[in-house]
Image (cartoon, rainbow, N blue to C red):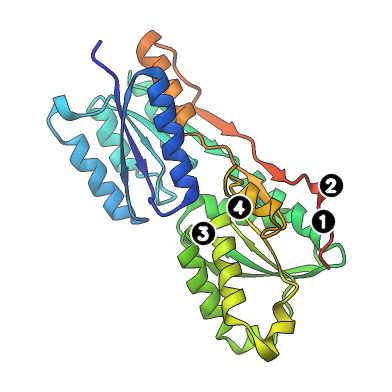
Amino acid sequence: MDQLQFLLSLTTDDNDYQREQLAAAENTARELGVVVKTIHANNDVFEQSQQLLEIIQSPKRWRPHAIIMEPVSGTGLPRVAEAAIAAGIGWVVLNCDVDYIAEARPKTKVPVFAITSDHLEIGRIQGRQFAALLPRGGSVLYIQGPSGNLAAKQRTTGMEATKPANVQVRAIRGQWTEESASQAVTSWLRLATARDSRLDLIAAQDDEMAMGARKTLEKQTSGAQQPNWSNVAFTGVDGLPRQGQVWVKKGLLAATIIVPANAGTALEMLVRFFQNGTQAPERTLTVPVSFPAIEQLKSIG
C-alpha cells in the first residue's frame, strides 16, 4: 500500500485548542508513519467548504485517503461530506454531532465516523463551577462561541441546565479567539447597563476568550469604575497543559475544563481501518473534567 495521506481541516490557526489539534495530529502521524496535511478555514464556513471541494475534485493521485474535519458550521458540511464519500475519500467529523454519518456508513466502504467532545457535559460542568464559585448567587457575563456553532449551542444548553437559579447570566458572542472576546467585552462595556451592573464572574466557552476578556477589563476599567470590576473572576474551557491549566495555577483563571484533543485519536482510528479493516464506532465521545475539581473550587462571592 502507498503511504497513507490524510487531510486535517481546522476552523482557524488563531486558537489554542485548534493548535493543540494540529500538534496531536502531527505527533500521531510521525508515530504511525503517515502524512497529514493541514488547512485552516479562518472561521469561515464558505471558505472551508470551498477548500475541501477543491481537494475532493482534484485528480485522484492528489486526493487524501481521508479527510478529518472540524467544522465551522454546526451542519458539518453534509454536501461536502457526500462529495468526499462519493469520491472514495474517508470522512471524519470532529467536535460536531451530525445526522448524516449514520445514513452514509451503510452505503460506503470508506471510513465514516465522528469523534466529539461531550459539549453538553462541558456546559454542565460550567454550570456546576458557577454554583461552587458563587454559592450565594451572583452575576455572570458569559462569552459564547459563534452563533452557528453547534458546540457553542450545546455548551450553553448544558450550562443552563445546571447553573443555580440565583446566578444571573448575560451572554455575548465571541469567535473562539482572544481578540474576538476583547472586542465583545469592549462593546459590552460601552453599554449604560454594563456600567451600572454588578459583575462577579466572566465565564467564556474557551480559555483564550476568557483571557481576552480579562486583559480587556484590566485595560479599560480604571479610576471610579475600578471598584465595580476589581473582584471579578474568570473561567474558561479547553484546559491545555501549557495554557489553561497554567493560567489557573497562576490565578489568572479561577477554573477551566480540560477538553482532550481528538485529532490524533481520529488518525489512529483511520490508520487501523486502512491497515486491517477495523471500522471505528459511528460516534466516540471524549470526557471533559473540571480543573480544578469542583469540590476544590473556592467561593469568590
The residue to which callout 2 is attached is 295
Seen at 51% across and 79% down, the residue is 187
Whether pointer 3 and pointer 4 mark residues with C-beta atoms closer than 8 Å, the reply is yes
Which one is nearer the viewer's eye here, 151 or 28? 28
Of labels 3 and 4, earlier in sequence is: 3
Amino acid carrying mark 3 in the image: Gly
Instruction: From the top left corner, tell me how far across and down residue 150 is, in percent.
Output: 50, 51
Of labels 1 and 4, earlier in sequence is: 1
**Badge nearest the viewer, 1 or 4:** 1
Element at badge 3? loop
Whether pointer 1 and pointer 3 mark residues with C-beta atoms closer than 8 Å, the reply is no
The residue to which callout 3 is attached is 145
Instruction: From the top left corner, tell me how far across and down residue 89 is, in percent.
Output: 28, 27
Instruction: From the top left corner, tell me how far across and down residue 60 is, in percent.
Output: 15, 26
Q: Residue furthest left?
A: 59
The residue to which callout 4 is attached is 155
Real-space CA distance between mark 2 and mark 4, rounded to the nearest whole angstrom:
21 Å
As drawn, 71 above or below 137: above
Real-space CA distance between mark 1 and mark 2, rounded to the nearest whole angstrom:
8 Å
Amino acid carrying mark 2 in the image: Glu
Of labels 1 and 3, earlier in sequence is: 1
Real-space CA distance between mark 1 and mark 4, rounded to the nearest whole angstrom:
18 Å
**Badge nearest the viewer, 1 or 3:** 1
Whether pointer 1 and pointer 2 mark residues with C-beta atoms closer than 8 Å, the reply is yes
**Badge nearest the viewer, 3 or 2:** 2
Q: Could you classify mark 3 by the number of other residues whose Cα lies within 10 Å: few (under 14), some (14-19), or many (20 or more)?
A: many
Of labels 3 and 2, earlier in sequence is: 3
Element at badge 2? helix
Amino acid carrying mark 1 in the image: Ala
Instruction: From the top left corner, tell me how far across and down residue 288 is, in percent.
Output: 65, 40
The residue to which callout 1 is attached is 132
